[in-house]
Image (cartoon, rainbow, N blue to C red):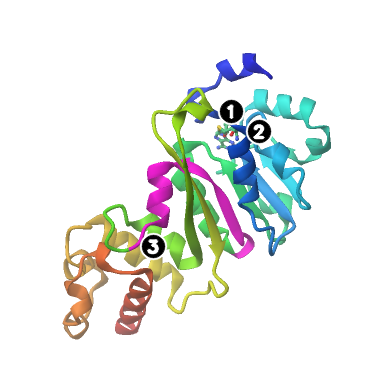
Amino acid sequence: MANHHQVKAKKKLGQHFLTDESIAKDIADSLSLEGYQHVLEIGPGMGVLTKYLLKKPIKTHVIEIDSESVDYLKANYLNLADRIYEKDFLKFDLTEIFNDDPFAIIGNFPYNISTQIVFKTIDMRDQIPEFSGMFQKEVAQRICSKEGSKVYGILSVLTQAFYNAEYLFTVPPHVFNPPPKVDSGVLRLKRKDNFTLSCDEQLFFRVVKTAFQQRRKTLRNSLKTFNLSDNLKANVIFDKRPEQLSVESFLELTLLIENDQT
Ligand code: SAH
């Protein structure tokens, strides 16, 4: 099936086509289908995952930057034709497709823009109750990791402030054409029931990013730019390094800083 297309996979677009049907089905089946009637697949390529999504009682939309893949999809998935968007996911305003409706995101993602995909999802969390798909394994693990892990960082804390993150399974390189150099990992994010933070959200983002920019320092040192009062800085939480703080502790820390500054 379309082997001529596969060998022309474009490296800069992160094209690694999945060739294992049962893995494609497992990824599609990772969606709970609860709380939304639309799903957006990022980077469908030749539709290996799309065809399993189309069997579900939900409206599938796909966004694909590569015109050759889009032509292939239009020719082979006739019932999808008016829901294929030839766009860059990172630049496209998704409310043009969904207005205010909730939608899930899924994909065997282009790995070169993995973290940007997650950050855009976090930005649009009000409309995205569920997210699942494949990243390079290291990124999938990082998103799901807990405090104390050496891969725990900005991506873990910001994602898990709003979503429960589950690492589902690992996928080896040989089931892709061309095979990537790294293992892949499939994860699922389910938005928390209460995903409104108890603290100032913008301040929370700034605290987390600033703390991890100097991850070996104590918070007392890394958060100097916040001009904290001596009284607050005496709190033992500032003896810690960012990787020691759970998501909950980061939220509490933000609240402390917020109250210190007002
Ligand atoms: N889902 C397919 C293809 C995965 S490869 C499969 O599993 O076989 C990643 C796909 O993402 C490629 O088709 C690539 O063209 C597409 N892509 C890369 N950057 C993109 C972007 N910014 N927006 C939308 N699609 C993108």
Q: Which residue corresponds to mark 3? A: 157
* Disc 1 + disc 2, Cβ < 8 Å: yes
Disc 2 and disc 3: Cα gap in Å?
32 Å
Instruction: Name the residue at the front extreme.
Output: 22
Q: Which residue occupies 71% across, 44% down? A: 53
Q: Are marks 1 and 3 in contact (CB under 8 Å)?
A: no
Q: Residue at x 80, y 35 (%)?
A: 81
* Residue drawn at x 26%, y 54% as measured from the top left: 150
Q: Which mark's residue is nearer the viewer, 2 or 3?
A: 2
> What segment is highlighted magenta in the picture?
126-146
- From this view, report whether residue 146 is shown above or below residue 227: above
Which mark is first along the chain, 3 or 2? Answer: 2
Q: Nearer the viewer, residue 35 or 95?
A: 35
Amino acid type of the residue tagged 3 in the rendering: Val
Q: Which residue is mark 1?
A: 19
User: Could you tell me which secondary element the residue under label 2 belongs to?
Assistant: loop
Alpha carbon of mark 1 to alpha carbon of mark 3: how far? 33 Å
Q: Earlier along the polypeptide chain: callout 1 or callout 2?
A: 1
Q: Residue furthest top?
A: 4
Q: Image height check: is 33 above or below 9?
A: below
In what element is the residue under mark 1?
loop
Instruction: Give coordinates of residue 77: x percent, y percent.
Output: 78, 32
Q: Nearer the viewer, residue 177 or 216?
A: 177
Is disc 3 placed on a helix, strand or loop?
helix
Proximity of marks 2 and 3: CB atoms separated by less than 8 Å: no
Instruction: For ligand 1, tell me if the residue under mark 2 lies within 8 Å.
Output: yes
Name the residue carrying label 2: 48
Relative placement, left or right, of 185 versus 98 is left
* Image quarter hosting the N terminus: top right
